[in-house]
Amino acid sequence: MGINIGGQIERVSGKELSYREFVERYMKKNEPVVITGLMDDWRACRDWVSEGGKPNLHFFSTHFGKSRVQVADCGTREFTDQKRVEMSVSQFVDQWLHCHGEDHADVSTSERNSILYLKDWHFVKEYPVYTAYTTPLFFHDDWLNLYLDYHHMHKDPDTYQETNEICCSDYRFVYMGAKGSWTPLHADVFRSYSWSANVCGKKQWLFLPPSQHHLVFDRNMKNSVYDIFNDVSDKTFPGFKMAVWLECTQERNEIIFVPSGWYHQVHNLEDTISINHNWFNSYNLSWIWDLLQRDYNEAKDYIEDIRDICDDFEGLCQRNLAANTEDAQF
């Protein structure tokens, strides 16, 4: 089943774009854009990439191999996301090389079809001394990560973990995946902005503006399409065929700005490493607040019948809200 591509994402030089122009042309209008020329001096672009332009997997295994990370199985769906398992970076690299390396004649069909994708690695928090990159000026006004950096959980993380079940270190991530790995259709957590920088490899992005998001939901506006390239049921998603998508191929050393509330699906066309931040500021804070209010009211209504027998009804509402937020994709 084909999808209707209605246009391409604009591509601009970051060296010729002022901060004011970025705000006026993209942030205020909530429009996506690909920005080039901002990654030339990044350490990640030297250390993490081999001479042939592929991910330097040996470097990751040698320097960061003991890190525990979340890895998605791109071939297995679990609820609204891909099934995830925890493993070390060295284990992930070993599986990557086993299934997708030069010598993989003994790899079974099921192993070859089960492409793993390392996601949501809190690299900056884990390796604060290793400066892999610098956040571009356009994305400095980041209230979300600034708040989390100075939150008391980072001053005394052991105490925080013992006393509070709801925690998050930051929203700065590294992603690594072989050709064919992908992320299902989603809008970013909190309806935040995000930016994604390709250290190496190539990605295909499909975008749907907020004005059309209802077209990828069912009649009750509860469940969205999982994979836009699958056979999508007309009965379950009656508006899907009317959606008009914007398409973008993101190359190495390019950064894409993802605005608030834009649903998107992303495919790695080559072996890829990317750096990703979720963030918000005054331009999209009101949208985020509205979303959290709606989600909170839904969480509260869902358990309203146990209010009288619950010792901490408000705390339960907050925990349910946090769990629902964590289920959202980045």
Image (cartoon, rainbow, N blue to C red):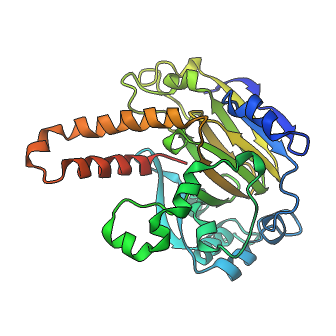
- The quarter of the image holding the N terminus is top right
Residue at 62% over, 77% down: 90
Between residue 329 and residue 318, name the one nearer to us: 318
Q: In which quarter of the image is residue 160?
A: bottom left
State whether residue 162 is above or below residue 23. below
The residue nearer to you, when weighing 104 against 56, is 56
Q: Which of 238 and 160 is in front in this view?
A: 160
Query: What residue is drawn where x is 53% and y is 38%?
Result: 191
> In this view, which residue lies farthest toward the right?
16
Give the image location of residue 222, x and y in percent.
38, 31
- Residue depicted at x 84% and y 68%: 46
| Image quadrant where residue 261 sits | top right
x and y percent of residue 294 in the render? 37, 33
Q: Where is residue 313 in the image (x, y as percent from the top left)?
A: 19, 48
Q: Residue at x 69, y 65 (%)?
A: 100
Residue that extends furthest to the left in the rendered view of this protein: 309
Whether residue 175 can be seen here: yes
Q: Position of residue 157 (x, y in %)?
A: 44, 73
Above or below, 90 against 283 in this view is below
Q: Decide if residue 26 is on the left or right side of residue 110.
A: right
**Any part of residue 71 in sight:** no
